[in-house]
Image: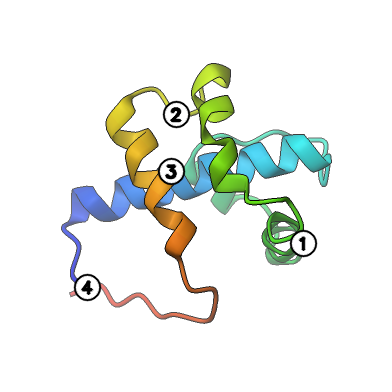
Amino acid sequence: MNLSLDEGMLFYDLYAALLSFVNRKLDVIPEPFSNAAEYMSVSPEVKRTIRGNALTLKNPVDRRVRLRKSGTIVNLKQLRIVGTWKEALPGKFYVFLL
């Protein structure tokens, strides 16, 4: 799948918002983050822990309405995008910037 630069930036912001929600729900780390830039400042070990804990939540994507209420995700288009991630395949993937 090829994403434009804007689509890629939106993905990373929404992904960080979802993991921020998981972090708050499970209290993995005390420092909150809500966007991709803040998420990127978190250590790789903590990122792995948060991602691993995301899988233990009973479908964190189904809790996306709470993301909207918390102000992390602000519009219905973004909410719909996150909703499609229920079908995501976990694994290792590579991102190439062309």
Q: Amino acid at mark 4?
A: Met
Residue located beneath label 3 in the image: 14
Q: Secondary structure at mark 3?
A: helix
Residue located beneath label 2 in the image: 73
Circle 2: is it few (<14), some (14-19), or many (20+) Cα within 10 Å? many
Q: Amino acid at mark 3?
A: Leu
In this rendered view, identify the residue nearer to me: 20 or 89. Answer: 89
Determine the residue positioned at 55% across, 52% down.
40
Disc 1 or 2, which lies upstream in sequence? 1
Residue located beneath label 4 in the image: 1
- Quadrant where the image shows the C terminus: bottom left
Disc 2 or 3, which lies upstream in sequence? 3
* Res 49 label: 1
Q: Secondary structure at mark 1?
A: helix
Q: Secondary structure at mark 4?
A: loop
- Quadrant where the image shows the N terminus: bottom left
Determine the residue positioned at 52% across, 81% down.
92
| Callout 2 touching callout 4 (CB < 8 Å) | no
Q: Please state if 53 lies on the left or on the right of 78 as rendered.
A: right
Compared with 78, 56 (above or below) is below
| Callout 2 touching callout 3 (CB < 8 Å) | yes
Determine the residue positioned at 49% across, 38% down.
35
| Callout 1 touching callout 3 (CB < 8 Å) | no
Q: Amino acid at mark 1?
A: Thr
CA distance separating discs 2 and 3: 7 Å
CA distance separating discs 1 and 2: 22 Å
